[in-house]
Amino acid sequence: MPARLDSGSQPSSSSASPSVSSWTVSSWRDLACTQQPIYPDESALVRVLDEVRALPPLVTSYEIEALKLALAEAARGERFVLWGGDCAESFSDCTSAAIASKLKILLQMSLVLVHGTRKRIVRIGRFAGQYAKPRSTPTETKNGIELPTFRGDNVNRPEFTKEARTPDPTLLLRGYERSALTLNFVRALVDGGFADLHHPENWDLEFVKHAPLGGEYQRMVDSIGESLRFMETLAGGTILAMQRVDFFTSHELLVLAYEAALTRQVPRREGWFNLSTHLPWIGLRTSDPTAAHMEFCRGIRNPVGVKVGPDTAIETLLHTVRVLSPDNEPGRVVLISRFGAHRIGRALPPLVRAIRDAKLHVVWICDPMHGNTETVVPTAGEWAGKSVKTRKFAHILAEVEQAFEIHRNEGTVLAGVHVELTGENVTECTGGARGLTDDDLSRAYRSQVDPRLNYEQALELAMLIARRAAP
């Protein structure tokens, strides 16, 4: 077992990227690696990873290749990508109700987008593996006591005690199990007709009856139902393809030892597939093109997402795309722009132009959430006088609208959106049709990490995007 990976280590900017032929499933261990937990008992970690290697994969190579083809079509403007879910999953939320409500809001949003864009929707969930989160610092201090930072349920526990905050490798097994349970339930719902376009009433969350845009949503449902019945009348029978939809999974690539344990070769296909998820992505904190996360991703056959922010340099971005896709494969590299409503207009166009002029195949996705996070201090309610992290709906919408305009001006395609949301009635983001204010945040703020759109705000955003993206 190589030496432990220090969570505070920094990537080397002078390292040269190795050739494609030199890649192995463990070659990332030779490079600087950030955001890794330090396990005090390495022998326990080895035993857990050996067990993970023997377990069945969570996804299949066939599904991964299907997603890559769909992403390539989205990059050409033939489909639209809806990518959403929790900022970070928790083990306690692995319940049938929580999973079904998340699935429902994604289905409702995709129904709205189908109606508005007149395109097939690629649905990607931030679920079945989003159990780790990056952190700005490896430790935190309270009352003079310094402990490791909480890095997500598959690394350690949130309680501020030494026992809870010590990274525990057995939690990787719990994360695998909950990922498998989530996927099993999602697949059972989809295969059992839960996503049947003939019965969109099955997706209705209670709020649709009372939401300000509920009437407009119902008109869309009725319109799609009429169109479907008309098509089936002409076809002389039920259109079976309308009885189910595809869902793909994604999560941020962080604990590389776990990801490597689920990376395998499969019969009748070339190369290696990370079978922990369909679409892993690399965040800003781990995006050094010469470091471990990029090294791991360049050798797997999955489509790979890369976050792009205000500090992303043009040459670095070009190098990153070429490292990940030396053959310039359509659907392979997904660039997720996250700038914030006040910076996207200045910072995104040069990057889009550089990629376009270099004739590189990428899938551009807008993440309007992360660049618009801010801290507010409510003046009333339970949290009066306390700092609270939130996002303004108006800023989220403004970033999406600017992204559409930028890509239109540059002659490129905005292939989709990436949002953090929940199917529950939380109050974590302000604004929207009901006009939530800072003082409303304490009513139902449940996220342990980042603020999410609630079901009503998510559906409203989908409706506004559908209007903007209409042909």
Image (cartoon, rainbow, N blue to C red):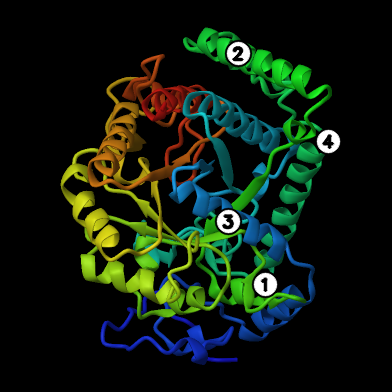
Looking at the image, residue 420 sits to the left or right of residue 61; the answer is left
- Looking at the image, which is closer to me, 126 or 146? 126
- Residue at which label 1 appears: 262
Q: Secondary structure at mark 4?
A: loop
Mark 1 Cα within 10 Å, few/some/many (few <14, many 20+)?
Answer: many
User: Residue 125 in the image: x percent, y percent?
Assistant: 58, 45
Q: Residues within 10 Å of mark 4 (few under 14, many from 20)?
A: few
Q: Tell me the amino acid under the disc marked 2.
A: Ser
Q: Is residue 340 or residue 158 the one in the foreground?
A: 340
How crowded pointer 2 is (Cα within 10 Å; few <14, some 14-19, many 20+) is rated as few
What whole-number distance in Å separates the C-alpha atoms at marks 1 and 2?
44 Å
Secondary structure found at label 1: loop
| CA gap, disc 3 and disc 2 | 29 Å
> Sequence-wise, which precedes: disc 1 or disc 2?
2
Does the CB distance between marks 3 and 2 fall below 8 Å?
Answer: no
Q: Nearer the viewer, mark 2 or mark 4?
A: 2
Q: If you read the primary sequence from the N terminus, does the residue marked by circle 1 or circle 3 appear first?
A: 3
State the residue position of label 3: 69
Q: Quadrant of residue 115?
A: top right
Q: Secondary structure at mark 2?
A: helix
Q: CA distance from mark 2 to mark 4?
A: 24 Å
